Image (spheres, helix red, strand yellow):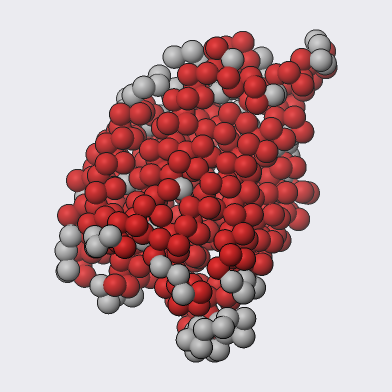
Amino acid sequence: MSKVVRTSESPWYRQVNREQWRAFFATFLGWLLDGFDFTIMTFILVDIQESFTVDAALAGALGTVTLLFRLVGGLGAGMMADRYGRKLPLMLSILWFSLFAFLSGFSTSYAMLFAFRALFGIGMGGEWAAGMPLALEHWPTRLRGLASGLLQGGWYWGYILSALTFSYIYPIFAAMPDPFSPSPDSTLGWRVMFWTGVIPALLVLWIRTGVSESPVWLARQRHLKETSAGELTDRVSVLRLFQPDLLWVTIQSSLLLSAFMFSYYSISFWYPTFLRDLGVDPVRYVIGFNAGAIVGIGLWGRASEGVLGRRGAVTLAALTGVATLPVFLMTSSVSLLFLGAVLMGATGGGIWGMAPAYLTERFPTAVRGVGPGLSYHIGAAVGSATPFVLGQLQDGGMTIGRAMSWCIAGSGLLVVGMIWLGPETRGRHFSALDDDEADRG
């Protein structure tokens, strides 16, 4: 008699079926291209300052307004995801941010670019709010931590893609005069970087035909039709998040993600400019940082399925990131700078491996689109001040490296404090009927 191989004895990737992988890649690729379109700007802040004659604070404000408007997209797409399914708002969000990334390249003034980046932020926020529940509701519970890390890694792959675009595409156009700018020193290179942002729109065609709707969401719709159809409107309302049993969940999750965002943008937004000021090509170090993050978030996400749990993994990653500061920003050795980039990616960037799983596990199915979407993007809105604050510190006389160091250390400690204000969520099951089992911890 042949031996039956249990699922738990199979390699993890064989425990995921084709339908689950398709949902994963829809979200992963959407997030990758979202990250690509946003981080493109971090390489061309100097060009934008020259084209529109603005200081560092105003250049940083372009990142700030994008992050602020992510809240609008996260809230809108999250509510749509709970009412109409996860796929539709995911596709609309990708189309939206692709359009406004492309239009950013035609800006003829700082005010126009500011407006386009604000509108871009709406689509950026919507992609995460709709995509993460789509993928994680498909995957097995026992692999959700790993999936969370791999999914969030899409952002870092996008950052690498933007670095490669800056390295190989930007130089081709960097010597060409800019026909849209009044500044004689402005070149076309930075505009081409924005124009490449239209590419993600092609992904929508595949999602529409190749990806199935969340089985958890579909099961809930069947349950609501069999019981009381009138409950549907009430239970997917954003107001549900502020009822007594979910109020602390919403507050704590939002505070935690604010700390996460403060940490990430302290590390990454001015990092290419920091490297350019040192006189080194930023591409190698940015790729090192993001490669470290891709490995780190996968490993931390996997580790969060064990004895560490979500909270322990976040804590260890964040504290190790703070300890990495001396080789990340406080050395002139190119070898140590590269080592610091990889280590900071694996640790300070690695905290994000647990974010999608933790947020989706905190909220019941009825609000798993709008709940994590709102918390994540409230965090983005609060964290949006980081690029501007770092710019202000520089305008006040502080070096980029010192300003980044203070903010990275403070935000890392804040992350540790905030994660322990909530309960451990590892191993929680998703159900169509879990609205009455909301986390009160």
Q: Residue at x 63, y 15 (%)?
A: 435
Left or right: 108, with 313 as reference point? right
Q: Is residue 438 visible?
A: no
Up the image or down, 402 lies above or below 284; here it is: above
- Tell me the quarter of the image containing the C terminus: top left
Up the image or down, 336 lies above or below 347; here it is: below
| 248 or 313: nearer the viewer | 248
Position in image of residue 409 (x %, y %): 25, 44
Q: Residue at x 32, y 73 (%)?
A: 276
Position in image of residue 289 (x %, y %): 34, 58
Left or right: 175, with 104 as reference point? left
| 289 or 100: nearer the viewer | 100
Q: Quadrant of residue 290?
A: bottom left
Q: Quadrant of residue 98?
A: bottom right
Position in image of residue 418 (x %, y %): 35, 29
Q: Residue at x 40, y 61 (%)?
A: 57
Up the image or down, 52 lies above or below 207; here it is: below
Q: Is residue 179 visible?
A: yes
Q: Residue at x 62, y 71 (%)?
A: 107
Position in image of residue 288 (x %, y %): 34, 62
Left or right: 154, with 93 as reference point? left
| 440 or 394: nearer the viewer | 394
